[in-house]
Image: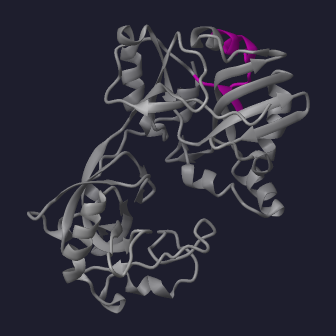
Amino acid sequence: MPPVQPMLAKAVSGVPDPAKHGGLSFEPKWDGFRCVLFKDGDEVELASRNTKPLTRYFPELVDAAREQLPARCVLDGEIFVALPTDGRDRLQFEVLQERIHPAASRIKLLAEQTPASFVAFDLLALGDESWMDRPFSERRAALVDALAGLPPEGPCHLTRTSTDPAVAEEWFHQFEGAGLDGVIAKPLGATYQPNARTMLKIKHERTADVVVAGMRPHKTSTEERPLLGSLLLGLYDDGELQHVGVSASFTAARRAELWDELQALVVPIEEHPWGRWQEFLVANPGRQPGTQSRWSQGKDLSFTPLRPERVLEVKYDAMEGRRFRHTAHFKRWREDRDPTSCGYDQLEQPVSYDLSDVLGE
């Protein structure tokens, strides 16, 4: 019965050696909402990674679970939305985020316009029996049997796996083109351990030179001791500075140093490239700083504008549209770089790959 916290993963660099872990099972790392699915007859519940209910937002998955999944089961998996991009189906995390909406009428409309899918990758219970104390090798075999016969078009799917690290290496590079986030490795002999980092995750990691365009104070900042919370980052596109994301990983001492160091670059918003965005009352497609959306209502989104004169190198994992998918990590200042030379052309683009090839065996 819910709530059940899902098993977690710790990051490692590169595909690990199965021999050092008593054997590993590799699978694609899906870029969606982690979901533990509970089904008992017609009763279906969808729970997020932090055990919050997702059921009302995905009525099409509730219907699909009733029709396609075993009568009584608890499955660990991921909810995703895939849409065609350049003729190929690709995961769309931004579209998935839009599915979390307070209005029932909007939920119904989005369920029809951007239907979600569910991919299962672990078995917690089947019938009256818990499988959480069984090794993953046994859970996987039972999951394959339980989900045999799923229609290839979904919307319920079974993730593919391999015990071959060479195959995992291929997936790591190929599947990113379909919007996936990397590769997961699971010890074949491990039991299911809620909220424990038993699995291993191998994610993409890249660097880029970006322009520092603004900053926000840390939540613990005071007038007596101002501290930097985050740096707002930009890249040039056709001569205009676009917002590409933030960097926010600093020690307390470094937060104080950076706040003082960057004061010399502070300018009035009217003199800043992003000054014109202040007229917007709601978020626009580029999610420019200072604009509101239903994700940020009530938050102080104001920022201190900085002259775009300094360049830093950041580490990032993936792009989401025109922005970094997650918070970028500060690496070093690049005093040798001209800010206007920092454009989108430096970003590595994965080779396009169709999601149907990921889901197919």
Quadrant of image for the N terminus: top right
Closer to the camera in the image, 286 or 296: 296
Residue interval drawn in magenta: 141-159
Closer to the camera in the image, 88 or 59: 59
- Name the residue at 37% across, 38% down: 351
Find residue 159 and report its horizontal and vertical position in percent: 59, 24
Q: Residue furthest right?
A: 42
Quadrant of image for the C terminus: top right
- Name the residue at 63% across, 45% down: 81
Q: Quadrant of residue 36?
A: top right
Position of residue 94 relative to residue 82, above or below, is below
Residue 142 included in the magenta stretch of the image: yes
- Name the residue at 83% across, 16% down: 127
Taking the image as drawn, is residue 308 in sight?
Answer: no
Position of residue 157 relative to residue 146, above or below, is below
Q: Residue furthest left?
A: 336
Q: Quadrant of residue 40?
A: top right
Q: Residue furthest front?
A: 224
Find residue 177 and report its horizontal and vertical position in percent: 43, 38
User: Left or right of 187: which side holds 344?
Assistant: left
User: Left or right of 163: which side holds 44?
Assistant: right
